[in-house]
C-alpha cells in the first residue's frame, strides 16, 4: 500500500486552516494542523512530515523563525503562505530556505501545483559525482560546502542550489525563466527580478575580491557561468 504524503499546515486563521485541510485531504494528503509557530516546531521534531505549509505571520514564533530553525535540521520542502506581497518579503522567505512562496488570497489549484512541484524537488545526487571544480572554485555536494582559492564561502541553501545549477550548465546562457523553473521550481513566467537579486548575492560572495569573474551577464538573454572544470 502506498504511503500517504503527510503535510503539516501551520496557519493561525481557523477558517483558512479548515478550508485548506479539507481541500488537501480531498486530494489524498494526510494533514496535520497547527496554529502557532512554537507548536509547529514541536510537531516537526516529534513527527515525520513530507512538506510544510507555513504562514509567515504566526503567534508565539514567526514563520520566518520557524523556517530558519527547521532548515538547520532538515531539507523538508517548505511553502510559505502570507498576505505580504513585496519582493523583499519573498526574498527573505526564500533566502531562509523556503522552497516556494504563495501570497494570499490564492486559488487552491495553484497551491496544489506548488505542492506537487515542491515534492518533486528532492534532488538526487549522483554518488559518483560528489564534487565540482571550476576554475579555482570547489563545490562539495555531500558537505554542501563551497571554497574559492581555498577560502570557505558561506552560502544559503538557495544560493547553493543556484550555483550548482549554473555550474552544471556552465558556458550555457540561462534565461531568468529557466533559472526560476529549475532552481525555484516555478513553472511559470514569474518575478524574474528574484533571480537578479540572487545572482547579485552570489557575485558578492564568489566573484567579489577574486581576480577572475565566473558569473557573466549576457545582456538581453540572462546569465552564464564561464570556466573549465578541472
Image (cartoon, rainbow, N blue to C red):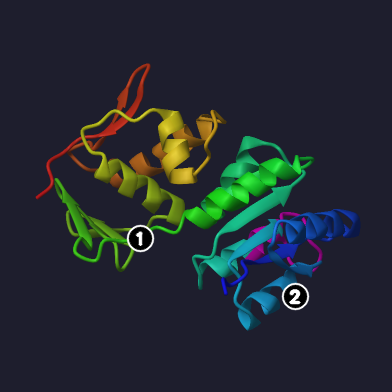
Number of numbered markers: 2
Secondary element under disc 1, as helix, strand or loop, is: loop
Q: Is residue 198 at all visible to an observer of this figure?
A: no
Question: Label 1: few (<14), some or many (≥20) within 10 Å?
Answer: few
- Dot label at residue 36: none
Q: Earlier in the sequence, mark 2 or mark 1?
A: 2
Residue nearer the viewer, 86 or 127: 127
For residue 86, which quarter of the picture? top right
**Above or below, comparing residue 194 to residue 59 in the picture:** above
Residue nearer the viewer, 211 or 107: 107
Q: Is residue 55 at all visible to an observer of this figure?
A: yes
| Residue 139 relative to residue 19: left or right | left
In the rendered image, residue 5, in percent from the top left (x then y), is placed at 61, 66
Tag 2 residue: 39
For residue 226, which quarter of the picture? top left
Q: Quick check: is 60 in the magenta stretch?
A: yes
Q: Kindly identify the residue that appears in the image at 26 percent across and 61 percent down.
A: 126
Disc number lying in front (2 or 1): 1
Tag 1 residue: 124
Secondary element under disc 2, as helix, strand or loop, is: helix
Residue nearer the viewer, 23 or 219: 23
Q: Kindly identify the residue that appears in the image at 37 percent across and 58 percent down.
A: 154
Range covered by the magenta-colored residues: 55-66
Q: Quick check: is 197 in the magenta stretch?
A: no
Task: Evaluate if marks 2 and 1 touch, with contact meaning CB atoms under 8 Å apart.
Answer: no
For residue 77, which quarter of the picture? bottom right
**Above or below, comparing residue 175 to residue 183 in the picture:** above
In the rendered image, residue 111, in percent from the top left (x then y), is placed at 68, 46
In the rendered image, residue 181, in percent from the top left (x then y), is placed at 46, 38
| Residue 156 relative to residue 3: left or right | left
Amino acid at each position: 500500500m502506498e504511503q500517504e504524503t503527510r503535510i503539516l499546515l501551520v496557519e493561525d486563521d481557523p477558517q483558512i486552516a479548515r478550508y485548506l485541510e479539507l481541500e488537501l485531504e480531498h486530494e489524498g494528503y494526510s494533514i496535520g494542523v497547527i496554529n502557532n509557530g512554537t507548536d509547529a516546531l514541536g510537531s516537526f521534531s516529534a513527527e515525520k512530515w513530507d512538506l510544510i505549509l507555513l504562514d509567515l505571520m504566526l503567534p508565539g514564533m514567526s514563520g520566518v523563525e520557524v523556517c530558519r530553525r527547521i532548515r538547520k535540521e532538515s531539507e523538508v520542502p517548505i511553502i510559505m503562505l502570507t498576505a505580504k506581497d513585496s519582493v523583499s518579503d519573498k526574498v527573505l522567505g526564500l533566502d531562509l530556505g523556503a522552497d516556494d512562496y504563495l501570497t494570499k488570497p490564492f486559488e487552491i489549484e495553484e497551491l496544489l501545483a506548488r505542492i506537487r512541484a515542491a515534492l518533486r524537488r528532492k534532488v538526487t545526487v549522483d554518488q559518483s559525482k560528489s564534487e565540482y571544480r571550476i576554475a579555482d572554485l570547489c563545490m562539495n555536494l555531500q558537505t554542501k560546502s563551497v571554497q574559492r582559492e581555498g577560502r570557505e564561502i558561506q552560502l544559503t541553501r538557495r544560493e547553493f542550489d543556484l550555483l550548482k545549477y549554473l555550474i552544471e550548465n556552465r558556458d550555457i546562457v540561462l534565461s531568468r525563466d529557466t533559472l526560476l523553473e529549475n532552481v525555484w521550481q516555478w513553472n511559470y513566467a514569474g518575478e524574474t527580478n528574484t533571480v537578479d537579486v540572487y545572482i547579485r548575492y552570489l557575485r558578492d560572495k564568489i566573484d567579489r575580491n577574486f581576480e577572475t569573474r565566473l558569473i557573466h551577464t549576457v545582456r538581453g538573454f540572462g546569465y552564464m557561468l564561464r570556466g573549465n572544470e578541472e
